[in-house]
Image: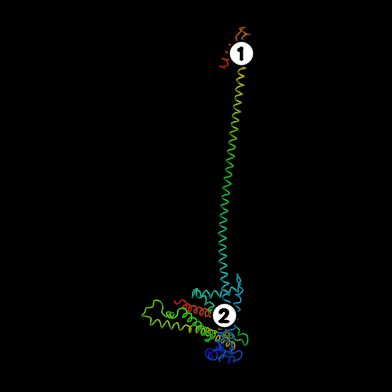
């Protein structure tokens, strides 16, 4: 939230800045520890702390343990419903994916900006991050598919009962819809988070601009309704955080189902 | 949009740290902690299923033992009724025997009494006849002076008494 000339730049929140200098390199690549990396680590720590509550392993769970078990059985039920009993070995990956996206989304929504010089950063609003996650998921589908079915995996592009006459048309469509998956997977999350955060910042700019306006009527007429709207949008954004994490995990498990069970 | 403007400068760092963090999450949490949570859930489900089965077994056992108890109760009641009936029958039989005995004894006593009464009556009659005869003889002798043989008197008296 850089106030440049009294204006709030809604894009500034997405800036990646090195925290401890720009000198860390690995094999010629710059791998400086940035605010993005910091929020990834915070996500890791948050998930780890959350999961610690599930390590009590009591027969009658307390609230925390029940929450951890609820999250893990939510994911394992989803995996089981979509992939079947063979999907059990993918549960750790889907769970990690779901928790990482969910917690990263929610952490980005936390109002830590009220502390001076602390800026929240939403890791999942970066196409680099969501793209890597999508590529990992898609690679997993390809590896599992070809490992289990060999070249027979290509029959994925021929739906059951397709007349031979239609094959020249159906196969390219199926192929393109298959190849578009990593892009739609990565872009969906990136766009949803980016758009939500831009909207929040624009609205926040209205509220602040209204309060700073010279005309006294602007604050109650513009600032207050927009503030009320922001409260609603914040709740909606929290919902989007959960839905996007769910959609990403759900689609990954559906794609893995194609690879494991091959229709 | 910084995500695209900065991408050439930051992609390596982002990808590196994402792989480090996500790999850690996958290994530490997905592979390390999640299975334990799932085991806990499975152990609990198993325990609940076992407890339910044990409760079902206990319920069946209780029903069985209740059944057995009912049977024993029934048998006991029947036994008691049989015993009571036998005792009743035995008592009735014993009292019938005693009653018969007493009846026989009473009959004997009655017959004896009757015989005694009969005997006394007969002897009284005989006495009466002899007294009557004597009295008649005396009366006849005193009134008429005639002497009648005892045999004739007693015959007449007998005839008169027999008519009376």
Nearest-to-viewer mark from 2 and 1: 2
Choose top left, top right, bottom left or bottom right for residue A219. bottom right
Which image quarter holds the C terminus of chain A? bottom left
* Residue B138 rendering spot, x and y as whole percentages: 63, 10
Q: CA distance from mark 2 to mark 1?
A: 153 Å
Circle 2 crowding by C-alpha within 10 Å: few under 14, some 14–19, many from 20: some
Query: Which residue is under mark 2?
Result: B27
Choose top left, top right, bottom left or bottom right for residue B145. top right
Identify the residue at image location x=58%, y=35%.
B97
Query: Which residue is under mark 1?
Result: B133
Dot 1 falls on which chain? Answer: B
* Residue A139 rendering spot, x and y as whole percentages: 49, 83
Does residue A150 appear anywhere in the picture?
A: yes
Which image quarter holds the N terminus of chain A? bottom right
Upstream in sequence: badge 2 or badge 1:
2
Circle 1 crowding by C-alpha within 10 Å: few under 14, some 14–19, many from 20: many
Dot 2 falls on which chain? Answer: B
Q: Which residue in the rendered view is the most extreme toward the top? A: B145
- Kindly state the secondary structure of the residue where label 1 is placed: helix
Q: Which residue in the rendered view is the most extreme toward the left? A: A165
- Kindly state the secondary structure of the residue where label 2 is placed: helix
In this rendered view, identify the residue nearer to me: A196 or A32: A32
Q: Are marks 2 and 1 on the same chain?
A: yes
* Residue B134 rendering spot, x and y as whole percentages: 63, 13
In this rendered view, identify the residue nearer to me: B141 or A83: A83
Choose top left, top right, bottom left or bottom right for residue B137. top right
* Residue A209 rendering spot, x and y as whole percentages: 57, 88
In this rendered view, identify the residue nearer to me: A158 or A28: A28
């Amino acid at each position: 939230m850089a106030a440049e000339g009294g204006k709030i730049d809604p894009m500034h929140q997405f800036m990646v800045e090195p925290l401890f200098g720009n000198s860390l390199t690995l094999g010629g690549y710059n791998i400086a520890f940035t605010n993005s990396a910091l929020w990834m680590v915070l996500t890791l720590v948050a998930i780890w702390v959350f999961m610690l509550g599930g390590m009590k392993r009591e027969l009658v769970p307390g609230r925390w343990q029940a929450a951890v078990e609820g999250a893990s059985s939510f994911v394992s039920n989803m995996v089981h419903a979509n992939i079947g009993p063979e999907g059990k070995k993918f549960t750790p990956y889907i769970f990690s994916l779901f928790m990482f996206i969910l917690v990263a989304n929610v952490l980005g929504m936390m109002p830590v900006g009220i502390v001076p010089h602390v800026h929240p950063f939403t890791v999942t609003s970066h196409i680099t991050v969501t793209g890597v996650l999508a590529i990992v998921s898609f690679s997993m589908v390809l590896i599992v598919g070809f490992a289990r079915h060999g070249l027979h995996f290509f029959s994925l592009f021929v739906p059951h009962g397709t007349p031979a006459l239609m094959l020249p048309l159906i196969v390219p469509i199926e192929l393109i819809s298959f190849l578009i998956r990593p892009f739609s997977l990565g872009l969906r999350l990136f766009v949803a988070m980016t758009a939500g955060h831009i909207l929040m910042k624009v609205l926040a700019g209205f509220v602040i601009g209204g309060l700073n306006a010279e005309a006294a009527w602007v604050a109650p007429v513009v600032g207050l309704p927009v503030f009320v709207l922001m409260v609603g949008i914040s709740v909606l954004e929290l919902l989007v955080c959960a839905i996007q994490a769910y959609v990403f995990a759900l689609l990954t498990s559906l794609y893995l189902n194609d690879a494991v069970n091959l229709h | 949009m910084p995500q695209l403007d900065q991408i050439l400068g930051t992609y390596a760092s982002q990808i590196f740290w994402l792989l480090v963090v996500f790999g850690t999450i996958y290994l530490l949490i997905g592979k390390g902690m999640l299975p334990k949570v799932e085991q806990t859930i499975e152990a609990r489900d198993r325990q609940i299923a076992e407890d339910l089965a044990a409760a079902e077994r206990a319920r069946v056992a209780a029903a069985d033992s209740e059944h057995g108890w009912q049977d024993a109760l029934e048998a006991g009641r029947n036994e008691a009724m049989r015993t009571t009936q036998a005792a009743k029958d035995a008592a009735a039989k014993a009292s019938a025997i005693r009653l018969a005995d007493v009846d026989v004894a009473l009959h004997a006593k009655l017959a004896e009494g009757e015989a005694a009464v009969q005997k006394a009556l007969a002897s009284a009659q005989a006495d009466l006849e002899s007294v009557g005869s004597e009295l008649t003889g005396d009366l006849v002798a005193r009134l008429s002076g005639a002497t009648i043989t005892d045999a004739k008197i007693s015959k007449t008296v007998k005839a008169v008494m027999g008519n009376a």
